[in-house]
Image (tube, rainbow, N blue to C red):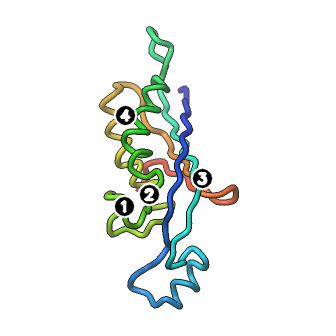
Amino acid sequence: MVYVIRKEHFNAAHRLYNPNWSEAKNEEVFGPCANKNWHGHNFELIVTIKGIPDPETGFVFDLKELGKLIKKEIIDKVDHKNLNMDVDFMTGKLASCENLVMEFWKILDPKIKSASSSAQLHKIHLVETNKNSVEYYGEI
């Protein structure tokens, strides 16, 4: 099995806030991330695909095409956006990295399956800060 990795970047703002809680509880749980005036990050999105290289191309998945797919389906929808307010697939969801990466999976997995009969989405790694990141393998 060969694993290929594509990195992309985007900038976005969000607020960690549960509307069912008081302002005080939100601040207690989420700290400065509950700021009512939002806060932003320079995110790094790392997508890993696994498979056996195609004998004709030597590719598991054409990384240039993967980059185009990620840009169209994810980056164009989240870059320089407010994740709480501007991103349709985050409507009604807490804008945590955990929820965000699961939504990315829902978008990318079927697109990758339809583009390749042998490659599979293996992992999505979302880096929020140099100290905080999440990984998702499609498991629920």
Q: Residue furthest top?
A: 56
Q: Earlier in the sequence, mark 1 or mark 3?
A: 1
The residue sitting at 50% across, 57% down in the picture is 12
Q: Amino acid at mark 1?
A: Asp
Q: Which residue is mark 3?
A: 127
Three-letter amino acid code at disc 4?
Ile
In whole angstroms, how far apart are the C-alphas of marks 1 and 4? 25 Å
Distance of label 1 from label 3 (alpha carbons) = 20 Å
Mark positioned earlier in the residue sequence (2 or 1): 2
Q: Earlier in the sequence, mark 4 or mark 3?
A: 4
In the drawing, what numbered circle is on residue 81?
2
Amino acid on which disc 3 is placed: Val
For label 2, the SS is: strand
Specify few, some or many for label 1: CA neighbours under 10 Å numbering under 14, 14-19, or 20 or more: some
Kindly report which numbered mark, 2 or 4, lies closer to the viewer in this rendering.
2
Instruction: Say what secondary structure mark 1 lies in.
Output: loop
